Image (cartoon, grey):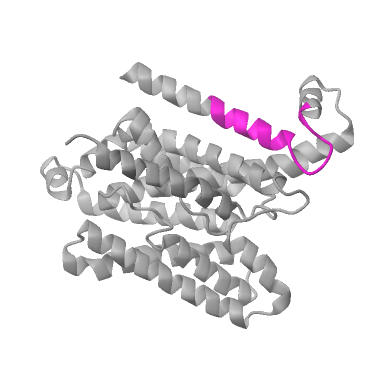
């Protein structure tokens, strides 16, 4: 089992590296794979070097960090709710972060103020869902239904803010809300947060395995359940807000990727968490590459690409689960 898990992580790491190479190699200009090879041997001209390293590489790394953050947030929420349908997008966490970030932007704020607003929105949305659903003892169906309703509420609030915003800002805001890496020229923040969260989740892998069995069982085994829940609240909110600030609202990454990793690696979160981070980053890098190259010179919203991939894939997973033997 350990050999299989190690092989899976190595394979995912290689695929992640390959996806970044593909993203850097292809774009709207004439610079392509040949220039990437020239960069490796040092024979590249300065103009092509700037395209590869100053334009395409930061965007690819931002997409990778965002995908990793969303996949980790989804996996954490699935542990927290003990439900495979949990996801920052479905539960309204992404919507809360987007609404607060957009409000901060319309108020004239920028930089860290927008980041902090998105974090508060993600945290507030997560807590709101749990507080409303608490009357049903946090039953899975009640939690998911509450999350869908809260997400619809945030969507309505975002629509109202867009309706009263200046028209000159409308197109950019709409693209950002549908997922856009056009202005993601500094990937350091999301990469650092996603990497730190991956390491943290790996260290806490055993505790997450215990928590996934249920609060009562975890308490009997000596796990500080309340402290773990609070830590997951804050960590998932931080990851979701980081992803929203970087690229807007991108759905299905946090829902589908943990499913696929669990199918390949089992339920051990010491493998699931780093595997989800690698797979989520790879998926979003490839989705963004398609979004900016499919209809050159136009760019498509990356959230639409992930939805087109995620919806049929998730329906396939549901179909397999329904036909699986009891």
The x and y percentages for residue 262 are 34, 35
Q: Residue at x 65, y 52 (%)?
A: 181
**Is residue 136 toward the left or the right of residue 166 in the image?**
left
Instruction: State the residue at coordinates (57%, 59%).
Output: 248
Q: Position of residue 194 (x, y in %)?
A: 50, 44
- On whether residue 23 falls in the magenta region, the answer is yes
Q: Residue furthest bottom?
A: 164
Front-most of 267 and 144? 144
Judging depth in this view, the residue of 117 and 86 nearest the camera is: 86
What residue lies at 40% left-to-right and 46% top-to-bottom?
314
Tell me which corner region of the image, top left, top right, bottom left or bottom right, holds residue 266: top left
Residue 320 in picture, x, y percent from top left: 31, 38
Query: Is 58 on the left or on the right of 122, as rendered?
Result: right
Question: In what quadrant of the picture does the C terminus appear?
Answer: top left
Q: Residue 255 vs residue 242: left or right?
A: left
* Residues shaded magenta: 14-33
Q: Is residue 219 magenta?
A: no
- Check the image and report above or below for 91 versus 132: above
Residue 147's image quarter? bottom left
Residue at figure coordinates x 80%, y 26% from the top left: 34
Q: Is residue 92 visible?
A: yes
Where, quadrant-wise, is the N terminus in this rendering? top left
Q: Main secondary structure of the magenta part?
A: helix
**Could you tell whether 25 is left or right of 100 in the image?**
right
Is residue 207 among what the camera can see? no
Nearer to the camera, 28 or 113: 28
Q: Is residue 5 above or below residue 200?
A: above
- Find residue 104 and report its horizontal and vertical position in percent: 57, 72
The residue most toward the top is 3
């Amino acid at each position: 089992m350990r050999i299989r898990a190690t092989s899976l992580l190595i394979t995912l790491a290689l695929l992640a590296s390959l996806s970044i190479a593909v993203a850097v190699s292809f774009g709207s200009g004439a610079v392509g794979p040949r220039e990437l090879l020239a960069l490796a041997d040092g024979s590249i001209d300065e103009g092509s070097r700037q395209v590869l390293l100053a334009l395409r590489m930061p965007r690819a790394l931002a997409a990778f960090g965002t995908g990793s953050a969303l996949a980790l947030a989804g996996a954490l929420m699935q542990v927290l709710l003990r439900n495979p349908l949990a996801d920052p997008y479905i539960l309204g966490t992404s919507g809360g972060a987007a609404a607060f970030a957009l409000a901060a932007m319309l108020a004239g704020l920028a930089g860290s103020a927008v980041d902090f607003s998105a974090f508060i929105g993600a945290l507030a949305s997560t807590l709101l869902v749990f507080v409303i659903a608490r009357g049903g003892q946090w039953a899975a169906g009640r939690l998911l239904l509450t999350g869908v309703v809260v997400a619809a509420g945030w969507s309505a609030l975002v629509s109202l803010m867009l309706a009263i915003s200046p028209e000159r800002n409308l197109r950019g805001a709409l693209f950002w809300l549908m997922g856009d890496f056009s202005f993601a020229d500094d990937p350091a923040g999301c990469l650092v947060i996603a990497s730190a969260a991956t390491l943290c989740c790996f260290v806490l892998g055993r505790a997450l395995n215990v928590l996934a069995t249920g609060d009562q069982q975890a308490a009997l085994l000596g796990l500080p359940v309340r402290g773990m829940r609070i830590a997951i609240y804050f960590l998932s909110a931080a990851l979701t807000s980081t992803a929203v600030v970087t690229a807007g609202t991108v759905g299905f990454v946090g829902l589908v990727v943990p499913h696929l990793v669990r199918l390949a690696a089992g339920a051990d979160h010491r493998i699931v968490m780093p595997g989800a981070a690698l797979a989520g980053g790879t998926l979003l890098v490839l989705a963004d590459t398609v979004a900016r190259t499919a209809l050159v010179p136009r760019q498509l919203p990356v959230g639409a690409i992930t939805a087109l991939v995620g919806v049929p894939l998730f329906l396939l997973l549901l179909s397999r689960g329904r036909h699986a033997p009891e």
